[in-house]
Image (cartoon, grey):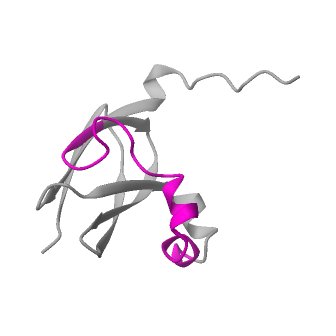
């Protein structure tokens, strides 16, 4: 029986606020490495089950939402009303905020 991997040290984590206009979008944070291994995201965007693994579930799971994530580069997918916006996000400092327009 293997032990679970230890949690990352707190200094590897960053707080991030994710917002959209209009609010209520689902957000998926896909590490850049995973995105690139999925035909630059195409395989993930075509398969909701695979994409759902990366859904932000803090709060009520939709924008505006705050979560913690490792300090690294992500491809963020914001989804609302059949529309998707994909944006590259780099979490650098301990506090980050990003907003996308979904109109």
Q: Residue 10 lies in magenta, yes or no?
A: no
Residue 25 position in % (x across, y down): 24, 58
Residue 33 appears left or right of 61: right
Residue span colored magenta? 40-66
Q: Does 45 sit left or right of 39 as displayed?
A: left
Q: Is residue 8 above or below residue 57?
A: above
Q: Nearer the viewer, residue 64 or 70?
A: 64
Q: Position of residue 96 (x, y in %)?
A: 25, 41
Vertical comparison of 98 with 11: above or below: below
Marks counted in the figure total: 0
Which corner quadrant holds the N terminus?
A: top right
In depth, the one of 77 and 36 nearer the eye is 77
Which residue corresponds to the image point at 48% horizontal and 73% vertical from the top-left?
Answer: 45
Queried whether the magenta region covers residue 52, the answer comes back as yes
Q: Position of residue 81 (x, y in %)?
A: 24, 71
List the single residue furthest toward the right.
Answer: 1
Q: Quadrant of residue 87?
A: bottom left
For the point 31% across and 56% down, the residue is 26
Residue closer to the observer: 73 or 55: 55
Left or right for 98, reference 30? left
**Residue occupying the point 56% across, 26% down:** 8
Locate the C terminus by quadrant: bottom left
Residue 24 location (% of width, % of height): 19, 55
């Amino acid at each position: 029986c293997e032990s679970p991997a230890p949690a990352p040290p707190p200094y590897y984590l960053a707080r991030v606020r994710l917002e959209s206009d209009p609010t209520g979008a689902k957000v998926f944070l896909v590490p850049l490495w995973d995105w690139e291994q999925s035909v630059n995201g195409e395989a993930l965007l075509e398969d909701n089950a695979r994409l759902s693994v990366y859904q932000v579930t803090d709060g009520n799971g939709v924008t505006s939402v705050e979560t913690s994530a490792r300090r690294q580069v992500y491809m963020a997918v914001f989804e609302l009303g059949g529309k998707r916006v994909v944006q590259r996000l780099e979490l650098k400092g301990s506090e980050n905020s990003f907003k996308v327009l979904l109109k």
